[in-house]
Image (spheres, helix red, strand yellow):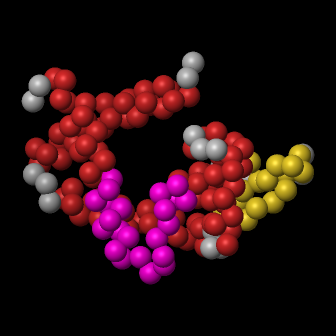
Amino acid sequence: MATDEFPDSLAAALAGVQRTIRRRLRGTLATPPLRGAQVELLRLVAARPGIRVSDAAKELYLAGNSVSTLAHQLSRAGYLRRESDPDDRRSTLLLPTQAAASRLNDWEARRSALVRERVARLTDEDRAALAAALPALRRLARNLREEEEGP
């Protein structure tokens, strides 16, 4: 493979793995699937309970009104609670519900089981190659993240 083709091939492979995992898991859901942006917001709120809508928008690189719409949808579905910020009544804080925690935990457990099973089917050499690539992939993710955040 030519050196200039490698970045595109890598991006396509990573996207393909992620897309296939999502498709496989969605097919086994007992509840209606959430859209990608909804899942991203739900994960962010679970990781940072009490995050302001404006901060979530900045973190997700979305417009504030888009995050507000997503938060309203997730609130209606029973996954988020919206509360006024006691320090600034104009701001809204987002908090995950128990239903959100359960759904995210279930998704993570099923994703882990699926990937674990599929990795076990690979040859020892393929598993070793993937393990050896993890540090470089983490650095790539960090570099991409730093570029988004700017200096």
Q: Is residue 9 above or below residue 78?
A: above
Q: Quadrant of residue 26?
A: bottom left
- Left or right of 43: which side holds 19? left
Q: Is residue 146 magenta?
A: no
Q: Residue at x 64, y 66 (%)?
A: 73
Is 126 displayed left or right of 117 in the figure? left
Q: Can the viewer see residue 113 in this picture?
A: no
Which part of the image, by quadrant, shows the C terminus? top right
Residue for point 16% across, 23% down: 3
Q: Residue furthest top?
A: 151
Q: Residue at x 11, y 48 (%)?
A: 124
Q: Quadrant of residue 110?
A: bottom left
- Nearer-the-camera pick, 134 or 18: 18
> How many marks on residues?
0
Looking at the picture, does residue 106 appear above or below residue 83?
below
Q: Which residues are magenta?
A: 18-39
Residue toward you, 60 or 69: 69
Q: Is residue 127 visible?
A: yes
Please name the residue shown 72% across and 44% down the image. 54
Instruction: Say which quarter of the image contains residue 19.
Output: bottom left
